C-alpha cells in the first residue's frame, strides 16, 4: 500500500535534501500544484480538435487560392479581349 507524505514529512525531506546538495530551491510538485492542468485524455482531445481545425483551414486556403487563380486568369483573358 502506498502512503502519502504529510506536509511536515515533505518539509523534513526538503530540508534534508537542501543540506545534502547545499541548495535552497528544492521544491516538490504535489497533486494540488498540478490540479489545474488537464488530464492526458483532455489534452489529446483538445489537441486533436486544434489539429483538425488547422487542417480544415489549410484545405480552405488551397481552395481559395485556386479560385483566385481561376478568377485572375479569367480577368486577364477579358482584359485582353477588351484591349483588342
Image: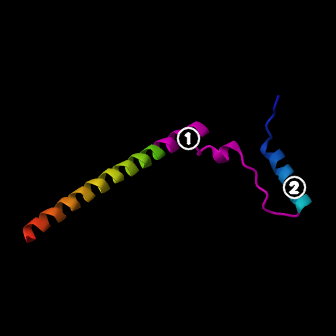
Q: Position of residue 2 (x, y in %)?
A: 81, 32
Q: Looking at the image, which residue is at 79% across and 57% down?
A: 26
Left or right: where 72 falls relative to 59: left
Spot occupied by residue 32 in the image (x, y as percentages of width and height): 66, 44
Tell me the crowding category of disc 2: few under 14, some 14 to 19, or many 20 or more residues within 10 angstroms, Cα based.
Answer: some
Q: Position of residue 68 (x, y in %)?
A: 26, 58
Q: Which mark is residue 17?
A: 2
Q: CA distance from mark 2 to mark 1?
A: 36 Å
Q: Residue at x 22, y 60 (%)?
A: 73
Outermost right residue: 20
* Residue 79 location (% of width, % of height): 13, 67
- Within-10-Å neighbours for mark 1: few <14, some 14–19, many 20+: few
When the figure is inspected, residue 75 is found, relative to residue 47, above or below; the finding is below
The quarter of the picture where the C terminus appears is: bottom left
Residue 20 lies, with reference to residue 34, above or below; the image says: below
- Classify mark 2: helix, strand or loop: helix
The quarter holding residue 42 reads top right
| Mark 1: secondary structure | helix
Q: Classify residue 37 as left or right of residue 64.
A: right
State the residue position of label 1: 44
Mark nearer the N terminus (2 vs 1): 2
Find the magenta span and give its range: 22-49
**Magenta stretch holds residue 56:** no
Of residues 60 and 15, which is closer to you in this image? Answer: 60
Amino acid at each position: 500500500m502506498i502512503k502519502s507524505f504529510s506536509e511536515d514529512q515533505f518539509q523534513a525531506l526538503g530540508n534534508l535534501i537542501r543540506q545534502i546538495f547545499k541548495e535552497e530551491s528544492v521544491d516538490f510538485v504535489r497533486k494540488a500544484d498540478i490540479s489545474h492542468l488537464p488530464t492526458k485524455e483532455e489534452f489529446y482531445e483538445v489537441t486533436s480538435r486544434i489539429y483538425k481545425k488547422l487542417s480544415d483551414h489549410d484545405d480552405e486556403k488551397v481552395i481559395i487560392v485556386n479560385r483566385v487563380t481561376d478568377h485572375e486568369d479569367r480577368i486577364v483573358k477579358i482584359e485582353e479581349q477588351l484591349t483588342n
